Image (cartoon, rainbow, N blue to C red):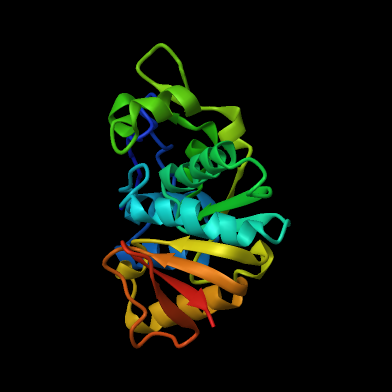
Amino acid sequence: MRYCSRRQQTIFGQKPFESACLPTWLPSLGELLTQVISGRNRDLRVAAVDAMTTNETLWFRDGYPFDVLANRLLPELGEGRRPIKIWSAASSSGQEPYSIAMTVLETQAKKPGSVSSVQVTATDISSTMLANCRTGIYDSLALGRGLSPERKRTFFKDLGDGRMEVMDNVKRLVNFRHQNLLESYSLLGKFDIIFCRNVLIYFSADIKSKVLNQMAASLNPGGYLMLGASESLTGLTDKFEMVRCNPGIIYKLK
């Protein structure tokens, strides 16, 4: 049995990317799973991850997390006059970390001197997604999901073929890195804010608990965690206290 991966990458509006047909003859699905889990065949593992991961996202998703970031968290954490470190976990095709970076730049422009430097680390398990994120190029379909005309003018340059590219001042704030949320986060360092939105819904309760406790250990004292609108910490960890922001809920490390 021959297993190949042929995915068209359309979310960025680039020419369809067709991965190389993996030259591996395997006798069964079980052998395929064994090789993927072992990690011996890197191309096979990358193709499997790309095939299984969900990359559904949009700009400034849900709205309120970015309002809370701009109006509460950045001013509060900016009082320390040290770099504010933000982690966008499972960043998918890049809209969330770039939305965070745009929010930072807008806040700095509106309130000069109120926010010190900000560093955004964006991680995902898909190497293909990360490579595309770094280009910062999106097609009209992706750009039409959550971006205002003003933000397009301010933070993007028109490539003249229906696509637009994120401006360099936005890109400079974001560092894209590979990270499996089921593995150690120690090499990422410590953060003041973690966005882990619409990710936990795909995990079992015990895995959710593990991820949340590891994220708690990755936060600086008084740090904040943002989850998706349908996600909750109930019964999973006791390391956070709920903060109501009207609208929305965030969680602060105890």
Extreme residue toward the top, this view: 160
From what the image shows, is residue 139 above or below residue 187?
Answer: above
At a point 63% along the width and 37% down the height, the residue shown is 172
Using the image, determine if residue 46 lies above or below residue 36.
above
Residue 87 in sight from this viewpoint: no
| Position above or below: 94 against 168 | below
Image quadrant where residue 77 sits? bottom right
> How many badges with numbers are in the image?
0
Foreground pick, 43 / 65? 65
Q: Residue at x 34, y 31 (%)?
A: 148
Position of residue 112 in the picture relative to residue 161 (left or right): right
Residue 89 in view: yes
Residue at 36%, 42% (x, y): give it.
59
Question: Looking at the picture, how far across and down is residue 223, in whole percent?
Answer: 57, 70
The residue shown at (43%, 22%) is 153
Q: Nearer the viewer, residue 165 or 47?
A: 165
Residue 97: where, in percent of width, then height? 49, 47
Q: Position of residue 240 (x, y in %)?
A: 47, 81
Q: Quadrant of the C terminus?
A: bottom right
Relative placement, left or right, of 188 versus 148 is right
Q: Choose between 246 and 123: the one closer to the eye.
A: 246
Residue 88 versus residue 160 in the image, above or below: below
Percent coordinates x, y for residue 70 in the rendering: 49, 51
Q: Quadrant of residue 236?
A: bottom left
Q: Nearer the viewer, residue 110 or 130?
A: 110
